[in-house]
Amino acid sequence: MMSKETVFSKNDSASNLEDGGLVIIDYGAGNIQSIKFAFKRLGIDAVLSSNPETIKNAAKVIFPGVGEASSAMQKLRESGLQEIIPQLKQPVLGICLGMQLMCNSSEEGNTKGLGIFDVDVMKFSGKVKVPQIGWNKIKNLSTPLFNGMEEDHIYLVHSFYAPLCSETIASCTYDMDYSAALQKDNFYGTQFHPEKSGDYGANVLKNFLAL
């Protein structure tokens, strides 16, 4: 697969980022435009890239994802990014399917994940409407990703979930309590969409930029 890279010019409000800037991984399975515009509203321009060197040299990395787990992992394998992402040393934020792919595995398509978060993604039971679409309350917040924030409502669209585990840094309830966000070392993940969660989501993105 040919490397693709779209560079957006920096501005003064992006000065809190190092020379590598903010990179959104572009592997053909992401909600990239809405994320790009969410950071644009914060005054941050971004680089969309599947180039391993660009990703490795970034100050911060966003790993997006929308769609089906096994096909998304296939796209990562085709680009070689399945080996690059777990080795990253800078702050990385996986969003929705991006977070799920950072787990050990997913029941969706019996997919082996990147193994960053030590938890297996499961499907909601038949006792609730699937997918869960809409607003839900986030609670039990911890880590600097939620610095200065209180429990509130965030926007989700998903049929699969990461159970509560030692790496859970926020939770929601739908059928049962599950992980709304995960963190291990420099890796963070949100099951919800910060870019679609209004001012609350914008504050999560601001906290990520401040890491």
Image (cartoon, helix red, strand yellow):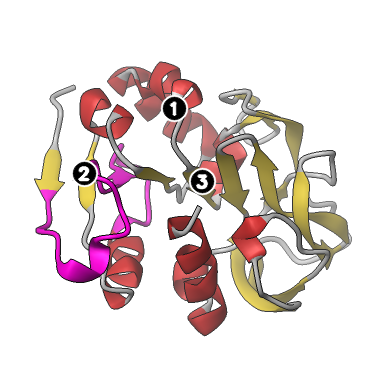
Q: Looking at numbered disc 3 in the image, what kind of residue is underneath it?
A: Gly
Seen at 28% across and 70% down, the residue is: 37
Residue 12, image quadrant: bottom left
The first of marks 3 and 1 along the sequence is: 1
From this view, report whether residue 92 is shown above or below residue 56. below
The first of marks 1 and 2 along the sequence is: 2
On the image, the x and y values in percent for residue 177 come to 88, 58
Q: Looking at numbered disc 2 in the image, what kind of residue is underneath it?
A: Asp
The answer to whether residue 4 is visible is: yes
| Magenta-drawn segment | 7-32
Seen at 53% across and 36% down, the residue is: 69
Residue that mark 2 sits on? 19
The answer to whether residue 158 is visible is: no
Q: How far apart, in angstroms, are the residues tagged by discs 1 and 2?
A: 16 Å
On the image, the x and y values in percent for residue 70 come to 52, 30
Q: Which quadrant holds the N terminus?
A: top left
Q: Report how many numbered discs are placed on residues in the image.
A: 3
From this view, report whether residue 111 is shown above or below residue 177. above
Q: How far apart, in angstroms, are the residues tagged by discs 2 and 3?
A: 21 Å
Q: Please give left or right for residue 145 compared with residue 73 in the image.
A: right
Q: Which mark is residue 88?
A: 1
Residue that mark 3 sits on? 94
Seen at 44% across and 27% down, the residue is: 88
In the rendered structure, does residue 99 fall within the stretch colored magenta?
no
On the image, the x and y values in percent for residue 189 come to 59, 48
Assign a secondary structure to mark 3.
Answer: strand
Work out whether residue 35 or residue 134 is closer to the camera in this orientation and state it.
Answer: 35
Seen at 48% across and 42% down, the residue is: 91
